[in-house]
Amino acid sequence: MSHRKECSSMRLRLLVVWLLLASASPGQTVHAIADIFKPLASPALAVRDLSYLVFAICGAIFVIVAGLLTYALFRFRRRASDGNSEPPQVYGSNQIEIAWTVIPILIVFVLTMTTARVIVALQDKSQPANALQVTVIGHQWWWEIRYPGLNIVTANELHVPVSQPGRERLAFLTLESADVAHSFWVPQLAGKTDVIPNRANHMWLDPRETGIYLGNCAEYCGTQHANMLIRVVADSAEDFDKWIAQQQKPATSDQSSAQSRAAFLGMACVNCHTVRGTSAHGTFGPDLTHLMSRRTLASGMIPNTFGTVFAWVGHPQAIKPGNLMPDMQLNDKELGQVAAYLSTLR
Ligand code: CUA
């Protein structure tokens, strides 16, 4: 293919991506990103309430100090009748000095103790018998999500059951990193928790409303840090059970996709990706067994459709420069086969 032709075909593919992005249809309720003032889970509520207390105390200190300062500036300013003599110089007052030492110590004590109480309550949360266990592994630049007890592996979209009064369901996350330091942050659900190599950190969530909660990596981890997005999908109990049953199935072995499947399995894709139920066992990239059940591609960057899968496999570096999926240099026929097979993985 000539250089010009190649450029125009790439431009066409990018256009497809942008069109799909623009027309992405709204599905479930998407809760606004970074809205820390609308917490919808216990850890985020605790953090918000503590923030309000700290803000109220610090705000009161500011108003008192700034008020006294303003009063003194006007009340004791130099007047024409003052002449050139120095004003009276006043030194030392045990009462005042004790007051302005003891009061701040008490304030710091209150702030320390209330903060410690929230931290301990969040960290030492006991796990109920029906708690969901999830391991989330940060990668440059996507999230691997494993449900150890359920034999499910997925990516970038963490499904948990909604937790409602009388039917509380807690999800306990074990956070690990495959490479560098990341940070897991879904503002409406909980505070940030660092994701550090060779260490397991823990946190828990109990979303109180169904819907999609947006979050992102909150620790600079390389060039695509800003595109390391996460979605927490809080399902109703019934939807969550359905999701589990669907995810536990091996990939479809439908006869109609036999040809494209054989083409896919013959390519280098299988060295990095797993498709359960086939000979693809790679673990370096995201598990593709139920790829099309996810709403987005490239860790939340673009919607997940046949068109975007086609564009992504063709030119992953054009969409997410620096990401660890190489441009496989597939010809149009191969690309069509791979995209056709991947789009059957529901
Ligand atoms: Cu991962 Cu920033």
Image: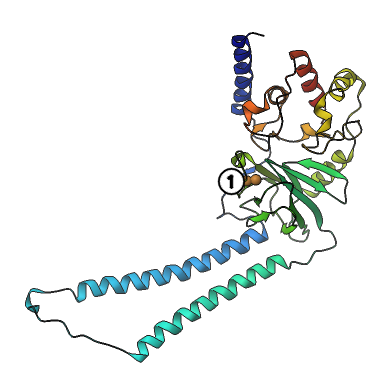
Relative horizontal placement of residue 199, taking residue 18 as reference (left or right): right
Q: Please, what secondary structure does the residue beneath circle 1 have?
A: loop
Asked if disc 1 is less than 8 Å from ligand 1, the answer is: no
The image quadrant of residue 327 is: top right
Q: Residue at x 80, y 18 (%)?
A: 337
User: Against 286, is 315 above or below?
Assistant: above
Q: Residue at x 80, y 49 (%)?
A: 237
User: Against 51, is 182 above or below?
Assistant: above
The image quadrant of residue 318 is: top right
Give how far across and how far down residue 41 sits, in percent. 67, 57
Give how far across and how far down residue 63 sits, in percent. 37, 69
Q: Nearer the viewer, residue 291 or 212?
A: 291
> Outermost residue toward the bottom?
94
Quick check: can you spot residue 215?
no
Check disc 1: other Cα within 10 Å, few if <14, some if 14-19, many if 20+: some
Q: Quadrant of the N terminus?
A: top right
Q: Residue at x 69, y 69 (%)?
A: 121
Quick check: can you spot residue 105?
yes
Q: Residue at x 87, y 22 (%)?
A: 266
Q: Which residue is mark 1?
A: 33
Relative horizontal placement of residue 142, taking residue 12 as reference (left or right): right
Q: Nearer the viewer, residue 176 or 17?
A: 176
Q: Quadrant of the C terminus?
A: top right
User: Against 27, is 71 above or below?
Assistant: below
Q: Nearer the viewer, residue 162 or 318?
A: 318
